[in-house]
Image: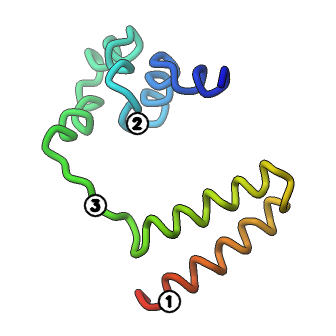
């Protein structure tokens, strides 16, 4: 839990957003000195965040939830030593290809 708290801290999210150009992962990230000062120098950094107010969710892939579950299960199998990373990902890929076959 300590790692999750560290990883999701506003300052960490601000650093990540500034370094990658992706939207900060929490509103608190935009209240940090890091993003406040960065936005003054580079106002475009706020565009994606500001567009979230009028954005709507969409599925990224056909069968999104089921594919996401396959990946999550693969990660869990590695974390519990039930499979090697390669085996877990190979199995998840095969299962995803079966799920996505009708979409192709």
* Colour setup of the view: rainbow
- Name the quadrant containing residue 58: bottom left
What x and y, as percent, mark residue 57? Answer: 26, 54
Q: Give the mark nearer the N terminus: 2 vs 3.
A: 2
**Mark 1 falls on what kind of element?**
helix
**Identity of the residue furthest to the left in this view:** 54
Label 3 crowd bin: few (<14), some (14–19), many (20+), radius 10 Å? few
What x and y, as percent, mark residue 61? Answer: 40, 70
Where is mark 1, residue-wise?
Answer: 101
Identify whether 20 is placed above or below 6.
Answer: below
In this rendering, would 85 be left or right of 5?
A: right
- Please tell me which residue lies in front, 14 or 99: 99
Q: How many marks?
A: 3
Residue 58 badge: 3
Q: Residue at x 39, y 75 (%)?
A: 62
Residue 28 badge: none
Label 1 crowd bin: few (<14), some (14–19), many (20+), radius 10 Å? few
Q: Residue at x 79, y 59 (%)?
A: 85
In this rendering, would 92 be left or right of 62?
A: right
Where is mark 2, residue-wise?
Answer: 21
Label pair 2/3, CB-CB below 8 angstroms: no
Q: Nearer the viewer, mark 1 or mark 2?
A: 1
Quadrant for the N terminus in the image: top right
- Please tell me which residue lies in front, 7 or 49: 7
The residues tagged by marks 2 and 3 sit, at their Cα atoms, a distance apart of 21 Å
What x and y, as percent, mark residue 49? Answer: 26, 34
The residues tagged by marks 3 and 1 sit, at their Cα atoms, a distance apart of 20 Å
């Amino acid at each position: 839990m300590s790692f999750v708290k560290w990883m999701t801290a506003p300052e960490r999210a601000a650093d990540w957003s500034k370094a990658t150009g992706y939207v900060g992962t929490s509103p608190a990230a935009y209240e940090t000195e890091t993003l406040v000062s960065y936005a003054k120098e580079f106002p475009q950094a706020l565009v994606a965040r500001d567009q979230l107010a009028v954005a709507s969710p969409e599925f990224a892939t056909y069968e999104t939830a089921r594919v996401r579950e396959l990946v999550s299960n693969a990660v869990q199998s590695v974390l519990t030593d039930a499979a090697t990373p390669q085996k877990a990902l190979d199995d998840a890929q095969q299962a995803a290809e079966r799920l996505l076959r009708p979409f192709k």
